[in-house]
Amino acid sequence: MATKASSKTTDSKLADFLCFAVYSANLAYGKAYRPILDELGLTYTQYITLICLSEQDHQIVSELGAKLFLESNTLTPILKKLEAMGYLRRQRSTNDERQVVVSLTEQGRQLRDQARGRNLVAATGLGQQDFKNLQKAVSQLRDALISSTQDSQ
């Protein structure tokens, strides 16, 4: 029978908080990605937006936002900036004028090709299987947290 983690927090140290471990790992990832992003001239959010579009081009803004866990009011300025940089194009859907379809441009595909293979798996110090296991566990954690916050609304 599974037991839940103790909710006792009076003796907890900062290092005992999983949320702090995730937060500080995110900061470390940001520092590690900085040279790659600087070379590409992108922010991390712009970078993952292009990666998402390279996996599936011609996405509706709402679908893209769901995959990136970004609200429309956060994603739209990112898309406008990437469009101004020449990496993507936004067009009204021919099926539903209320929807905007986002597509990579040739310049966006070239940047994607330039960025291909630039990831930080080796920098994590984890073997390939440990990396996959950790990635799966973090995704499960994210999904559980999202689910728990939706249940309480």
Image: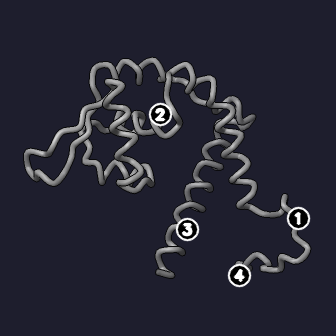
User: Position of 43 compared to 134: left or right?
Assistant: left
Kindly identify which residue carries mark 2.
47
N-term-proximal mark, 1 vs 2 = 1
Q: Which label number is shown at residue 53?
A: none
Assign a secondary structure to mark 2.
helix
N-term-proximal mark, 3 vs 1 = 1
N-term-proximal mark, 3 vs 2 = 2
Assign a secondary structure to mark 3.
helix
Q: Please tell me which residue lies in front, 123 or 33.
A: 33
Kindly identify which residue carries mark 3.
144
The amino acid on which the numbered mark 2 sits, given as a three-letter code, is Tyr
**Residue 141 location (% of width, % of height):** 60, 62
Kindly identify which residue carries mark 4.
1
**Residue 46 location (% of width, % of height):** 45, 36
**Residue 130 location (% of width, % of height):** 68, 43
Q: CA distance from mark 4 to mark 2?
A: 43 Å
The amino acid on which the numbered mark 3 sits, given as a three-letter code, is Ala
Q: Which label number is shown at residue 13?
A: 1
Q: Residue at x 49, y 40 (%)?
A: 45
